[in-house]
Amino acid sequence: MNAENVHQDTDLAAPGITREPDDGSGAASDAAFEADPAESLARPAGATADWAEQAAAPADQPAAPAGAMSAERLAAKALEARLLGGERKLRRREVAAGAGVSLLSARKLWRALGFPNLGDDDVAFTERDQAALSTIVDLVREGVLTEEAAISITRAIGQMTDRMVVWQIEALVEDIVQKQGVPDAVARKQLVGQLPSLIDALEEMLVYSWHRQLNAGVQRLAVRAEAGLQSSEEGREGDEDDAPLPLARAVGFADLVSYTSLSRRMNEKTLAQLVQRFENKCAEIISVGGGRLVKTVGDEVLYIAETPAAGAEISLALCRAFTEDEILPQARVAMVWGRILSRLGDIYGPTVNLAARLTALADPGSVLVDSMTAAALEQDERFVLVPRPAEDVRGFGEIHPVQLQPGSGRGLILD
């Protein structure tokens, strides 16, 4: 990369935007976020500008002659050029100026994407970075998005794609290890050479899935909203702690029994297989039931559904699936119908907390609901409700758990 084609420390702030001198801390000035960010592949903090080439070099590879690159480094460099859309030729100030914003405005969105800081002298960006920055900036300038919304959406993209990439890489490495019987370190080197043949297919599936998921989200908003609003009044007096929250949802937790003790007796590979089996089974059942898997945390999964009945069907199906599974232990499951706040892809509110508390009270292989949720389900023949003794629950006082059991009908069918 030629770093001599740009005059160092030139003021490249966009015309009409006042910019104070950068103090070297990265906290450059700015008048306002009239537009923002870009997409970049940034180096880790403290690394030198050629960190990508250094990271790509295998540890056991003899040093290449001066001016020459090893085959692995050449492959990594070619892969980087393909992924970034070309060679790194731009500094951060040039990218910001090209998008017509100050450096601080650009850095707001780079941080939202999860990228570490770069110095003024780092030639780390491509024209695709500038185009990505301009895309989100234009949405703000045209009034389509506010600054806050732009940063939030950008943060969602950064966090979700980061997790997705780590997941995919680990799955591909594991596949190479299993098929070829090579060590993990060798598999990771080989993956660099295999990725070019996979990029187009992975990108196509990503875009396809995003379209389908966005459509499903629209359907939940438009088509299922009426059912959810109608159900939201069932069993409610209107003065509960969660009443001011906007969304009425069935919130459920499923927690594997004895996971901690099991994990201590397992090796890394066996534990990974158990966790993957657990997550796959949960994701399948929740999606078939019309719910949404909010997140998994080790041995626990959090999910939501639009109606009490849908949440109950999913909860019973999860409980049954783990009871019948030959490998996984049983699960404790709890579900509460109430209002929630949805932010940053997660959910919050007393309903979520109560569902978590009930999960800890449930017996292995059983499903618990609270009395309000039971009231919303009591006229549905698909469910049997068995009251349990009152419990004093931290943060909620005395509650009346009710065990949920299958009634008439076949329940959730997994084909």
Image (tube, rainbow, N blue to C red):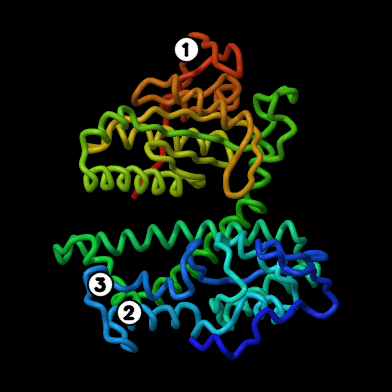
Please determine whether, in this image, residue 313 is positioned above or below residue 225.
Answer: above
Q: Amino acid at mark 2?
A: Arg
Number of disc labels: 3
Which mark identifies residue 73? 2
Q: Earlier in the sequence, mark 2 or mark 1?
A: 2
Q: Earlier in the sequence, mark 1 or mark 3?
A: 3
Q: Earlier in the sequence, mark 2 or mark 3?
A: 2
* Residue 83 in view: yes
Q: Nearer the viewer, residue 23 or 146?
A: 23
**Which residue does the image show at 59% across and 83% down from the upper left?**
127
Q: Amino acid at mark 3?
A: Gln
How packed mark 1 is, by other alpha carbons closer than 10 Å (few <14, some 14-19, many 20 or more), is few
Determine which residue is flagged by label 1. 388
How packed mark 3 is, by other alpha carbons closer than 10 Å (few <14, some 14-19, many 20 or more), is some
Q: Secondary structure at mark 3?
A: helix
Question: Residue 233 vs residue 160: left or right?
Answer: right
